[in-house]
Image (cartoon, grey):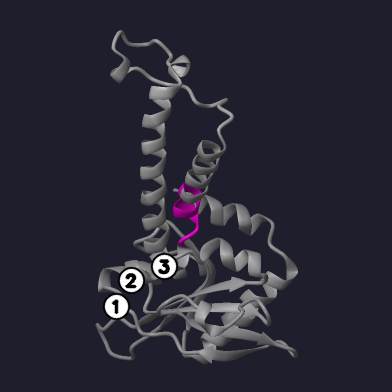
Amino acid sequence: MVGDNLDSQRAKGESRRHRELKRLSMEWLRLQGCRAAATEVRLPLSPYRVDVAGYRASGRMGVLGETFALECKQSRADFLRDASVEGEARSELEGVAEEVERLRGLLRVHLPECRQGLSLFREYDAYDFGDLRHERWRRLVSRLALLERKLADGVKFSRIARYGAANFCYLVVEEGVLKNLGEVPVGWGCLVREEGSSLRLEREAERLVSEEAARLTFLERVAARKG
């Protein structure tokens, strides 16, 4: 899947700072009572891996506990890659796609030489505008491609929360990665690394609804990574 492949590629080029954030995240989870924790865990109900995952038992026989998903971001560029809001990206994509189609219709009328001649009827034929030196056309097509990529792999935080992949989701960041707490994704909490190798809680995560089946799968995947 797209998200899974991207996460795997990024993990291969992991930096020392990112590894340190993951180590501190593991320690923080243990302090929260998570006796099971692991790195690079594939989340249920989503195509993504999360940097650090933890499970906190309920302490009651037959009752599943709570799950934690932590994403570590060492730089602002790293954060922005995953921070797009899905609804906004999709809405803009639809608007740009409509503009592209309107302009395509006009170009078919005014540039008949771009017709490929694959059909006897002009209205059913294909047109090739690939080499067209039309500023608005090139700008719209470029923006459309960018939004398609953004929607495919740049809405990780939004989707994890919406799918209920974990009960608690936290960003773990270096100082200065976020301009303000308003950038923290909806429902997510935030931990900031301080000098001296400790994490400072900046915002508590909301408790998200995660179904029992998802939590059980989550625990199984954490256990498999630990093994």
Residue 154 within the magenta-colored segment of the rendering: yes
Amino acid found under the numbered disc labelled 2:
Gly
Q: Name the residue under label 3.
A: 158
Residue at point 41% right, 67% down? 158
Query: Which residue position holds label 2?
Result: 164
Answer yes or no: do the residues labelled 1 and 2 have beta carbons within 8 Å? yes
Compare residues 184 and 91 and report the one nearer the observer: 91
Report the residue at 40% width, 32% height from top.
Answer: 104
Residue 157 visible here = yes
Residue under the point 67% across and 70% down: 75
Q: Mark 3 to mark 1: distance in Å?
A: 14 Å
Quarter of the figure with residue 90: bottom left
Q: How crowded is mark 2: few (under 14 residues within 10 Å), some or many (20 or more)?
A: many
Residue 82 percent location from the top left of the image: 52, 63
Q: Is residue 12 left or right of residue 93?
A: right
| Residue 125 covered by magenta stretch | no
From the top left corner, tell me how far across and down residue 190 is, in percent: 53, 83
Residue 132 pos. (x, y %) = 55, 27
Helix, strand or loop status at disc 2: loop
Per the rendered image, the range of residues in magenta is: 148-155
| Residue that badge 1 annotates | 209
* Residue 3 appears in the picture as rendered: no
Query: Can you name the residue that lies furthest to the front here?
Result: 110
Q: Which amino acid type is marked by label 3?
A: Ser
Chief SS of the magenta region = helix
Which numbered disc, 1 or 2, marks the residue that appears first in the sequence? 2
Of tags 2 and 3, which is closer to the observer? Answer: 3
Q: Is residue 107 above or below residue 94?
A: above
Query: In the figure, 161 relative to 121: above or below?
Result: below
Secondary element at tag 1: loop
